[in-house]
Each structure stands twice: as structure tokens, then as C-alpha cells.
Image: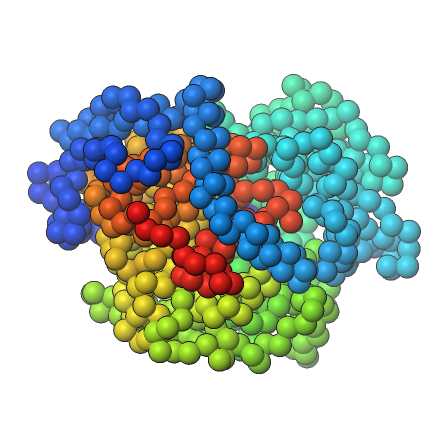
């Protein structure tokens, strides 16, 4: 709804939870009993070393470490890998990188071929669609051979002189990692507040630059939360930003005045509840600044008139457990998306500017439980609602009298996201449209006629014919009868007789949607006969709030059994076979990978788990780590015996055993605060000493990066090339290179 972006969670691409089936350690809940039938007893004794560990493969020293909770004991011989400053830890991670390089040596040239193929599809010198704002046109551009974008603007039209806001390539010089996270222009468009990250963590630096002259101001602020740079007050001098606490939670609202040292910045508000974090934004009409505090269950917002930087932030509605609401302001009144009064999938209400509390909320549109409202963009003339119906994203245009008109989309499966819509007085809404076969396009909808104009479609250098590819949406049936959607894309000439390799991806957490989108790099898979599929498992938000709630907390195992049901369905329908079925997931999707290979290692040939959240129980048991306390509402709090038992039942690291695991490639980031590097490192150590399949178990750690991997656009392509080369190799599709022999 115009501003807050949830950051810090364990995700790749974005309540009132049901407690689910609960129990005690002495009386296991049914989900735990189900997993106990498939897994070994969950009192984990570390498997013996040396059964199948290949000669020369790194295996870190085993050091006794005992953990006990609720009468349950775990032994973790690699707990010491958490010691980031220990030279032995860094030496081990480097040894793992060297081992991975040596094991992938047979496909090194093939990986380079994929990289050049993928890079060759990208127009290296390019412009984004200019976005009007305050008499300027703002845009990003990239240069041939350059890793980072240049953020720039021109006054009036693109014929004017260019003013560079920030050149990421200049800023990245001499740095192992660099990311320009966000920038915010002052209301008079003179000063840019620029948020930068230089180590891949979620702790950023805030700096200020006069755009017309290129002068960097002496103002510099550290320990700023990753995400939005912050918001300006109307005086063009006061800037509000969020500062992190010791666990890297966005916990403090700070006020900075240009020209004053950072140590003079004033603490305006501190969120004391460790399960809540802050976000900050300006309303659509720029009249108010909004401070949101919340988690996925409960939200509370404070507002401040933008022209009163020293005024009091007032609460819209005091926090009430289970009440969610997000705030905007337009057309002389407040607008709120809320789940009040049982509106599980959110409804839009209005409230007077002078009395916005819940007692004055008035439904603007009738609530429809079949429609999920995800976002609203407000203009002077009306609004655009982003909704989901039957799992499909849609757009609807409404005026302030409540007349609503749907916007037609050209394909059956696609992804849409709001683009740059900073001009509140604009007569058109911009959004990004893409599907599995349609490159990203910036499209504009006229708010009166609903006519659509494609302003720019991302070029695929060398050409791309979408008619060569087929898109499908099918359903699998989970064990409890729930229908699980699957999105698929393949070349039309790929046979459906079980002979094709297939890459199945999934996520299923935080209520985030995993919609099909175009990735030109993926053509390197599809053109070699692969089918690509997305399992829309429970825990995501594709089918509304209930879909999310049925894949979190005590019901989290549904995500894993849903993914397995999708894999089995694809095999039964002759899309593929187990010896050519691959899987991939990132972050919380990496947890999905770790859980399903414990449950059904026989289903998969190869698995890639990027920055995987696989040591769930240890991480969620340590409140000093980033994200832990704020994510109790997602995974549970292990101090509670039932939550401990549920997490233990699926925690991938704790459930590794002597099994014929598929080939596994895991990645990590040394500076990753969301999924610490030691999680994939420990997981790989235990897998390698336990697997009976003889297939490779590999780890690659970015020693200068964090959760998002490499910061440069070309280095990112190299990571995709490595992942695809791994899957292609294991399934015999690596341009004639034979699959690796199993030991």
C-alpha cells in the first residue's frame, strides 16, 4: 500500500495464526508422529564419520557440544563453526570452496559456456523507463561491462542534461562488495539520502549528496536498517531513518538534521518488543510520515504531519493482538488495509484525517473472502488495487466513489508488480508484467479509459520467440486432499513421456507469493530439454491468508509434504522420472529442500539449496541472533515444548541420517545475518558423513557477501550458471559431458 516493505526475513523475491495441532514432549502431536514414521528417532545421535566421505573432502573437526531442552538432548559436533573470527573456520570454508571447484572441474568449461550464453542475452547498455517526479525524470542506466547501475535524472524531458545521483560503479571501486540499497530525494529535489551496504549484511550506511553539484555532505550515519533509506520531512532538512539494535532488528526511529553530526541524532521512538520490527514511509500524498511496528500477526502505526518534524507521532489504533492494518493518506482522508472484523484476506476502509481510530473506520468496498487485497496505490483521481483471486494476481481500478473496474491480462499465469508511481497527480498507473515466457515489461494503464500501453519490454539479445514455449498450470493432491497448484514451462517440443529432466522450485513461507516470471537465463535450461516448475506449497500467500496459516508454526510440515506431493504428481503424469528430477530453493526455500531430502531422498537426482535455513532449532533457540525473536510468529518459540517438538521434527540438520541422498550443492554467505553461514556449513558436514548414495555433497560460501550473494549483475549470472550446470551435469544434459560416477 504504498510504502512498507518487509525486510530481514529469510526470503529470496515478499495475522492471526492458527495454533494448529499442539501437544507436549511426552504426548507428541500428530504431525510429529507422522514424521517419526518416516524419520529416525528425533533424539539425534551424530552419524559415524567416514562411511562414504570421499577421500580429500573437507570434514571439520568434531568437538563435543551438548544441548538440552525439555528433557531432550542433542549433540552438535560442529557447533564451533559459529566462531566467525576463528581462523580454523575461515580455513575450512576456503577448503570447501576449493573442494567444490575441484569437483565441478569436469564442467568448468561448460559452466563458462552457460555464463557467456546467459550474459549474451542481456543488453548490457540499457535504460529503465524514466519515472516522472517533481519536474524531473528519474531513471537507472547500465553501461557495457559495468557490474552496477548508474542512478540519474533529467529535468523536464530526456533531452535535458543528465545529473547523476549515484554511480554504483564508482562507489564499488576497491570494495569486495557494494550495493546501493535505496535513495530518497528531498522534497525540493536537491539532496539525495543514499543508503549503501558494503559487506552484504543488513547493516547499512546513510550518506547525503547534493545532486546538482555531486558534492557529498559531511553527514554520515551508521547502523541503519536495510531497506528504505528513510523519509524526509517537508522542511528539506530533517530526515527520519531506522536504526538496528544488537540483533540487527529495525528497532529505533531516529531524527537527523542536515549539517549536524550523527551523534546528535535524536531517538524518536524505540520498539521494545523483540518480536516486532519497524518500517517507515511517506503517504501517497506526502502529507504524513508513517511508522509501522509489527509482525505477521499484529500491526500498529504512528503518523506525523510531514510539515511538523518536531511534532508528536500519534497512534492510529493501539496494538491489539491479532489486528493488522496498514495506513495511507489520500483524497483528504486516511485509508487502511486491515483484517478487522474477520476480514482474513484484508479489506479497505477509510477514516477521517482528524480521527483515524478504529471506531471511525468505514468499509469502502464490500469484503469478499475469495479476493485477497495485497496492495493499493493512490492517486488524486482514484486508486489501483492489486488483488489475487483463485491464486491469480489481478489489477482493479477504483474511483473515490467506490466504482471498481477490472483490468484484463493477456495470459493465464503471470506476475505483476507496481512500478514507479511517485507522481500522485498522474493519470496513469505503471506496473511490471512478466510471465514464464514473456520478458518483463513496464506497462501503463490509463486510469480513465483503462487502455494499456507497453512502455518498454526487456530485450532478449539474439531474439526470443515465446510461441516456442508452453505454459501450464496443473494441480497435485496432498495427503489431506488439498489441491496444490503447480506452474510449468517447457519448450513445446519437449516430450511428456517421462524422459525430460525437470527442475522443481518452491518457497512456501511468510505468506509470500512465488509467481512465474521470465528469466532469460532459464532459456539455457529449457533449450536443453528441461521443464521448469514451481510448486505453490502452503506457507506462501498465493491462495490467501488461510494458505499461509496452513503452512506455518505447527502446520509447517504441510509445506514439505505438499512439495513431495507435487514431485510425485509430476512423475505420475510422465513429466519426468526420479533419476532426472531436480529441485531448488533459497533461504526459507532452502529449508524446504533440506526437509524434503530427509523425507524422500529417492525422489530427486540433484538439489541446490541457496543460503538454506537448515539449522532451524539451534537458530530459533538463540534469541541473540538476528531475526530469531521477530520470527517466533513464523516458526514458533522453542522455549515452548510443543514448538520445540515441531521444529525438531523437521529441522533438516537435526534429521540427517544414513540415507541415499541426492547430489547436493549448498551455498552460504559469510556476512549473512538472515541465515548464518554456519547453517549450510554444518549441514553439508553432516550430509557428507552420512549419505550412502555416493553422489557429491558440495558447499560454496561467499566470503565477501551476505544473504543475496554477489552484488554485481554479471557475478549473479555466474551463480545461476553454476546452479544450472550442476543440474544439467547430474541429469546428463551438459552438452555431452557424462554425469559424475557415483562412489
For residue 722, side relative to residue 474 (left or right): right
Q: Going 21% across and 43% down the picture, which residue do you hit?
A: 658
Q: Going 34% across and 57% down the picture, which residue do you hit?
A: 605
- Seen from the viewer's position, the closer of residues 503 and 471 is 503
Whether 174 is drawn above or below 525: the answer is: above
Q: In the rendered view of the protein, which quadrant contains the N terminus? A: bottom right
The image quadrant that residue 480 belongs to is bottom left
For residue 514, side relative to residue 657 (left or right): right
Residue 395 image point, x, y percent: 55, 70
Q: Going 67% across and 76% down the picture, which residue do you hit?
A: 452
Q: Is residue 485 visible?
A: yes
Residue 566 image point, x, y percent: 31, 66
Q: Is residue 363 visible?
A: no
- Seen from the viewer's position, the closer of residues 320 and 58 is 58
For residue 244, side relative to residue 453 (left or right): left
Q: What kind of colouring is applied to the model shown?
A: rainbow
Q: Going 46% across and 25% down the picture, which residue do you hit?
A: 91
Residue 547 image point, x, y percent: 34, 61
For residue 595, side relative to residue 715 (left or right): left
How many numbered marks appear?
Answer: 0
Whether 644 is drawn above or below 727: the answer is: above
Whether 235 is drawn above or below 724: the answer is: above
Whether 740 is drawn above or below 304: the answer is: below
Residue lying farthest left?
A: 26
Residue 717 image point, x, y percent: 59, 52
The image quadrant that residue 93 belongs to is top left
Amino acid at each position: 500500500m504504498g510504502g512498507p516493505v518487509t525486510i530481514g526475513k529469510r526470503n529470496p523475491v515478499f495475522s492471526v495464526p492458527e495454533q494448529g495441532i499442539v501437544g507436549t514432549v511426552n504426548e507428541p502431536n500428530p504431525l510429529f508422529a507422522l514424521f517419526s514414521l518416516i524419520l529416525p528417532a528425533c533424539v539425534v545421535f551424530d552419524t559415524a564419520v567416514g562411511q562414504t566421505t570421499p577421500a580429500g573432502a573437507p570434514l571439520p573437526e568434531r568437538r563435543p557440544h551438548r544441548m538440552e531442552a525439555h528433557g531432550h538432548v542433542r549433540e552438535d559436533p560442529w557447533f564451533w563453526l559459529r566462531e566467525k573470527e576463528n581462523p580454523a573456520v575461515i580455513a575450512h570454508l576456503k577448503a570447501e570452496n576449493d573442494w567444490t571447484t575441484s569437483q565441478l572441474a569436469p564442467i568448468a568449461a561448460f559452466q563458462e559456456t552457460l555464463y557467456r550464453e546467459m550474459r549474451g542475452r542481456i543488453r548490457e547498455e540499457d535504460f529503465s523507463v524514466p519515472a516522472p517526479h517533481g519536474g524531473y525524470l528519474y531513471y537507472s542506466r547500465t553501461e557495457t561491462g559495468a557490474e552496477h547501475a548508474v542512478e540519474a535524472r533529467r529535468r523536464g524531458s530526456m533531452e535535458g542534461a543528465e545529473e547523476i545521483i549515484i554511480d554504483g560503479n564508482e562507489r564499488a571501486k576497491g570494495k569486495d562488495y557494494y550495493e546501493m540499497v535505496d535513495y530518497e530525494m528531498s522534497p525540493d529535489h536537491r539532496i539525495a539520502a543514499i543508503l549503501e551496504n558494503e559487506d552484504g549484511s543488513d547493516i547499512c550506511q546513510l550518506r547525503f549528496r547534493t545532486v546538482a553539484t555531486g558534492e557529498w555532505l559531511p553527514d554520515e550515519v551508521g547502523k541503519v536498517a536495510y531497506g528504505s533509506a528513510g523519509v524526509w520531512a517537508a522542511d528539506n532538512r530533517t530526515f527520519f531513518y531506522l536504526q538496528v539494535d544488537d540483533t540487527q532488528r529495525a528497532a529505533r526511529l531516529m531524527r537527523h538534521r542536515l549539517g549536524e553530526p550523527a551523534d546528535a541524532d535524536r531517538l524518536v521512538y524505540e520498539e521494545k518488543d523483540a518480536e516486532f520490527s519497524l518500517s517507515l514511509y511517506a503517504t501517497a500524498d506526502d502529507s504524513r510520515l508513517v511508522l509501522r511496528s509489527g509482525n505477521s500477526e499484529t500491526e500498529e502505526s504512528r503518523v506525523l504531519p510531514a510539515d511538523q518534524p518536531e511534532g508528536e507521532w500519534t497512534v492510529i489504533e493501539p496494538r491489539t493482538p491479532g489486528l493488522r492494518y496498514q495506513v495511507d493518506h489520500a483524497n483528504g482522508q486516511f485509508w487502511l488495509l486491515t483484517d478487522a472484523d474477520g476480514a482474513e484476506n484484508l479489506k479497505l476502509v477509510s477514516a477521517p484525517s482528524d480521527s483515524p481510530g478504529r471506531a471511525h473506520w468505514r468499509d469502502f468496498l464490500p469484503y469478499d473472502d475469495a479476493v485477497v487485497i495485497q496492495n493499493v496505490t493512490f492517486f488524486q483521481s482514484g486508486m489501483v488495487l492489486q488483488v489475487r483471486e483463485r491464486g491469480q494476481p489481478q489489477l482493479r481500478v477504483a474511483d473515490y466513489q467506490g466504482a471498481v473496474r477490472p483490468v484484463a491480462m493477456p495470459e493465464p499465469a503471470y506476475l505483476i508488480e507496481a512500478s514507479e508511481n511517485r507522481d500522485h497527480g498522474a493519470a496513469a498507473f505503471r506496473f511490471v508484467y512478466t510471465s514464464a515466457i514473456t520478458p518483463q515489461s513496464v506497462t501503463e494503464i490509463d486510469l480513465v479509459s483503462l487502455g494499456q500501453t507497453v512502455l518498454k519490454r526487456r530485450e532478449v539479445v539474439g531474439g526470443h520467440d515465446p510461441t516456442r514455449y508452453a505454459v501450464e498450470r496443473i494441480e497435485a493432491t496432498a495427503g489431506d486432499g488439498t489441491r496444490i497448484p503447480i506452474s510449468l514451462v517447457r519448450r513445446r517440443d519437449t516430450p511428456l513421456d517421462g524422459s525430460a529432466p525437470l527442475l522443481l522450485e518452491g518457497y512456501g513461507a511468510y505468506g509470500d507469493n512465488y509467481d512465474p516470471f521470465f528469466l532469460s537465463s532459464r532459456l539455457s535450461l529449457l533449450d536443453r530439454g528441461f521443464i521448469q516448475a514451481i510448486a505453490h506449497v502452503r506457507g506462501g500467500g498465493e491462495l490467501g491468508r488461510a494458505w499461509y496459516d496452513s503452512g506455518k508454526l505447527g502446520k509447517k510440515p504441510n509445506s514439505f509434504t505438499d512439495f513431495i506431493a507435487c514431485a510425485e504428481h509430476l512423475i505420475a503424469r510422465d513429466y519426468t522420472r526420479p533419476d532426472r528430477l531436480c529441485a531448488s530453493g533459497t533461504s526459507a526455500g532452502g529449508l524446504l529442500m533440506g526437509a524434503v531430502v530427509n523425507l524422500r531422498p529417492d525422489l530427486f537426482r540433484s538439489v541446490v539449496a541457496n543460503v538454506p535455513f537448515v539449522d532451524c532449532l539451534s537458530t530459533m533457540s538463540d534469541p541473540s541472533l538476528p531475526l530469531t525473536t521477530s520470527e517466533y510468529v513464523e516458526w514458533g518459540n522453542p522455549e515452548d515444548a510443543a514448538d520445540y517438538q515441531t521444529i525438531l521434527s523437521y529441522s533438516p540438520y537435526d534429521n540427517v541420517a544414513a540415507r541415499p541422498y541426492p547430489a547436493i550443492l549448498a551455498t552460504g554467505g559469510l556476512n549473512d545475518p538472515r541465515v548464518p553461514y554456519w547453517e549450510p556449513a554444518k549441514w553439508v558436514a553432516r550430509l557428507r558423513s552420512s549419505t550412502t548414495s555416493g553422489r557429491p555433497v558440495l558447499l560454496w560460501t561467499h566470503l565477501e557477501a551476505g544473504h543475496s550473494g554477489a552484488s554485481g549483475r554479471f557475478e549473479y549470472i555466474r551463480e545461476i550458471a553454476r546452479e544450472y550446470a550442476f543440474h544439467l551435469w547430474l541429469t546428463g544434459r551438459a552438452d555431452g559431458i557424462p554425469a559424475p560416477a557415483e562412489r
